[in-house]
Amino acid sequence: MSITPAEPSTEASTDLGTRTSDLRIRALDPLPAPRGLLESMPLGTARSDLVTTSRREVRDVLTGEDDRLLTIVGPCSVHDPAAALEYAGRLATLRRELSDDLVVVMRVYFEKPRTTVGWKGLINDPHLDGSHDVRHGLNLAREVLLGVLDAGVPAATEFLEPTSPQYIADAVTWGAIGARNVESQVHRQLASGLSMPVGFKNATDGDVQIAVDGCITAASEHTFFGADAEGRAAAVETTGNPDCHVILRGGRSGPNYSQEDVAAALRVTRGSGLGGAVETGVIVDASHANSGKDHVRQAGVVHEIANRIADGEHGITGLMMESFLEAGAQQPGPLSELVYGQSVTDKCMDWETTEDLLRDLAKAVRERRG
Ligand SMILES: O=C[C@H](O)[C@H](O)COP(=O)(O)O
Ligand SMILES: C=C(OP(=O)(O)O)C(=O)O
């Protein structure tokens, strides 16, 4: 299951006077080819069925063919596999109970885009100590994803490193391009080749058009630099992803989940000419700039949206929530020193609050039907 570490190559030339490249590279540590990881931890038939079925369900909800609500819920980031899997086990029970009204997918986020610097997630630094054992991080990430699927819960993740999907994307039901990368051609091209529905967040300044542009770009065919399953540099040709859509996460000037904000965003998305999920509705991220990253305010946002859905509002096809076993957040550090089940990135709602809110949302969907 694990892959033998290779020695980092440190080809530091002694003749610095004639070198013009790699002047700021400390080491290049070759990573295992994706195929090795996929073969040592295969998806298998049962998990693959869950991924395929749940991708279809998510797409149908986002295009309005299915009148349920997509709820993407889970920790801001995974740092402790045991806590993530305990959360998945709890969510599995609730997912089954609420399945007539909600399509529940768990946030299983391994790559964190930072405003400046900070812990970049389980793949980049699995020991949370700056040792950056990326090989171990890749193993761990795949192990967690397979465990979440074994619990019966489909997974959502943000794609950040352009070649990381090769190691894990087969196990992912829904993907995100985050607010800091939504204008990046690299990420838009990446989304054009991903096999699952992908949400584009509005930019950190609140610009929604940038997310729509991301969907337009990702719906097209592209050729770009990537890697194949053997880890060789490759020119990747994609067919385009027709299942992209917009996520409202608030911006520098404040939240954007009000009825007026959603209506304004829909005017923008409906001008795209893309049809499908982009024009049917938006996902609202109740966290981030929609709640000032405050988990108590986040619960208020979800509560307000549940009331609006119960009153008959359409146009919000999904809701994203940051939730973990314990409320709040703590500074990242070695696992033995951390509070079990509490976020090391953004503040999360606790399990009890999450359970209540998911039940409220399911009830709201029933009332809207009625
Ligand atoms: O979702 C997590 C964070 O909001 C995102 O990674 C940015 O975090 P930062 O502003 O603390 O760097
Ligand atoms: C980083 C995230 O969000 P955003 O891109 O909206 O800041 C996230 O959802 O983890």
Image (cartoon, grey):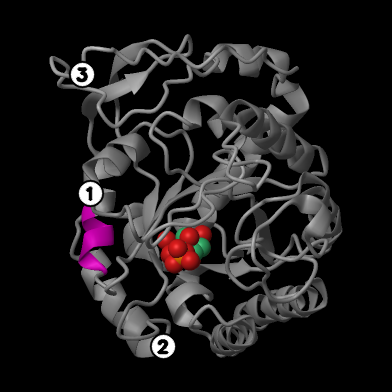
Q: Quadrant of the image for the C terminus?
A: bottom right
| Residue 110 shown left or right of residue 229 in the figure | right
- C-beta proximity under 8 Å, tags 2 and 1: no
Inter-mark Cα distance, 2 to 1: 25 Å
Q: Secondary structure at mark 3?
A: loop
N-terminal of the pair, mark 2 or mark 3, is 3
Residue identified by numbered label 1: 216
Q: Regarding mark 2 in the picture, which secondary structure is present there?
A: loop
- Residue labelled with disc 3: 16
Q: Is mark 3 within 8 Å of ligand 1?
A: no
Q: Is residue 237 above or below residue 333?
A: above
Q: Residue 305 location, x and y as percent? A: 55, 84
248 relative position to 203: left or right: right
| Ligand 2 within 8 Å of the CB at mark 1 | no
Label 1 secondary element: helix
Camera sees residue 106: yes
> In the rendered structure, which disc, 2 or 1, sits on the residue that comes first in sequence?
1
Which quadrant is the N terminus positioned in? Answer: top right
Which contiguous range is marked in magenta?
A: 208-213
Measure the alpha-carbon separation of dots 2 and 3.
Answer: 58 Å
- Residue 51 sits above or below residue 175 on the image: above
Pointer 2 residue: 258
In this view, the residue in front, 61 or 282, is: 282
Picture quadrant of residue 167: top right
Estimate how packed mark 1 is, as few (under 14), some (14 to 19) or many (20 or more) residues with alpha carbons within 10 Å.
Answer: many
Question: What's the CA distance linking mark 1 and mark 3?
Answer: 46 Å
Of the numbered discs 1 and 3, the one sitting upstream in the chain is 3
Tell me residue 28's x, y (percent): 42, 21
Q: Is residue 204 magenta?
A: no
- In the image, which is nearer the foreground, mark 1 or mark 3? 3
Q: Amino acid at mark 3?
A: Leu
